[in-house]
Structures are given as structure tokens and as C-alpha cells.
């Protein structure tokens, strides 16, 4: 079972390969290219990857400036093994540790991703103009 580790520049080709391989929430164009990952994992946020046999099979990226979940994807054939949940939990914990009170994301409706986020405690807030569903998660008060 692969454990998440911090993503580096050398991981970006593998991360992008996973991003292009997913069956849901597919990229409609070349709007996201490999160079977009640099700032996402080095400047505005942090990324994590899970490897198996030397290949990246899942990754997540969170934006510490905006609280946005920029990416969370698992390669086809590797779903259902807990990789996504482990990445999610590490990313959310890190973002809240940065002092962010409210995290947000959007995803296509009727997808496994939507069900995943709802099961992980995210709250649906509204439908965006492009039809995606907008979710939030708030940091729980420390007792």
C-alpha cells in the first residue's frame, strides 16, 4: 500500500499522465498543462503522490492561498484501494494546519468524485454556472 509523499517537479509528468487518464472529470481541452503544476506544488500550494512499482498512480494538490482542492485523482485500475482517501486526508490536514478555515472544490455532478467528497464530509453549497457542484469543508474548532 503506497503512502502519500510530497510531490516534486520530477513527479509532474506522472501526475499529468494520471490526470489525463481518468474517466470522470476529464479535461475538456489542454487548459491544464504540465507547467501549471509548478506553481501549484511549489508556490501556491503543495502536492502529494502515491507510487506503486515506481509509477505515480494517484496525486493530490491543495492551494494554501485560496483553500482550493486543485486536484485529487487516482489512475484507472487503482481506484477503491484507499489511495484517494489517504491523499485527501493528508492534504486537508495540511491545508487546515496552514490556518485556512474554509476549503472548497468543485466537481462534476453524478460522479464517483461527488460521492467520495460527500462521504468525506464535504457540504454541497451550490451549482456553479458551468454546471459543476461547489462544495466546502470548514475546519472543526479545536476543543
Image (tube, rainbow, N blue to C red):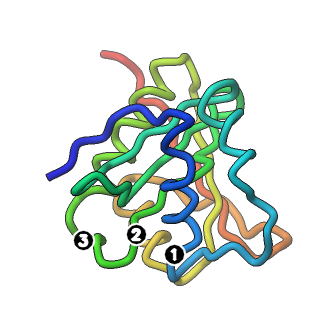
Q: As rendered, which of 65 and 29 lies closer to the eye?
A: 29
Give x and y (percent) for residue 20: 58, 71
Are circles 1 and 3 on residues that touch, CB within 8 Å?
A: no
Q: Secondary structure at mark 2?
A: loop
Foreground: disc 1 or disc 3: 1
Residue position marked by numbered label 2 in the rendering: 75
Residue position marked by numbered label 3 in the rendering: 80
Q: Secondary structure at mark 3?
A: loop
In primary-sequence order, the first of circles 1 and 3 is 1
Residue position marked by numbered label 1 in the rendering: 21
The correct choice, above or below, for 136 with respect to 142 in the image is below
Which of the 4 image quarters holds residue 134?
bottom right
Q: CA distance from mark 2 to mark 3?
A: 11 Å
Give x and y (percent) for residue 29: 79, 74
Judge left or right: residue 9 versus residue 58: right
Q: As rendered, which of 22 and 101 lies closer to the eye?
A: 22
Are circles 2 and 3 on residues that touch, CB within 8 Å?
A: no
Amino acid at each position: 500500500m503506497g503512502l502519500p509523499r510530497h510531490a516534486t517537479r520530477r513527479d509532474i509528468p506522472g501526475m499529468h499522465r494520471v490526470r489525463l487518464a481518468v474517466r470522470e472529470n476529464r479535461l475538456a481541452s489542454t487548459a491544464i498543462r504540465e507547467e501549471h503544476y509548478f506553481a501549484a506544488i511549489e508556490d501556491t500550494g503543495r502536492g502529494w503522490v502515491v507510487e506503486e512499482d515506481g509509477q505515480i498512480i494517484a496525486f493530490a494538490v491543495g492551494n494554501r492561498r485560496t483553500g482550493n482542492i486543485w486536484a485529487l485523482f487516482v489512475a484507472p485500475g487503482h481506484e477503491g484501494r484507499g489511495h484517494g482517501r489517504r491523499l485527501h486526508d493528508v492534504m486537508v490536514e495540511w491545508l487546515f494546519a496552514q490556518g485556512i478555515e474554509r476549503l472548497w472544490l468543485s466537481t462534476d455532478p453524478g460522479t464517483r468524485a461527488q460521492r467520495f467528497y460527500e462521504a468525506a464530509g464535504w457540504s454541497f453549497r451550490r451549482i456553479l454556472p458551468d454546471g459543476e457542484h461547489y462544495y466546502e469543508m470548514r475546519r472543526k474548532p479545536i476543543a
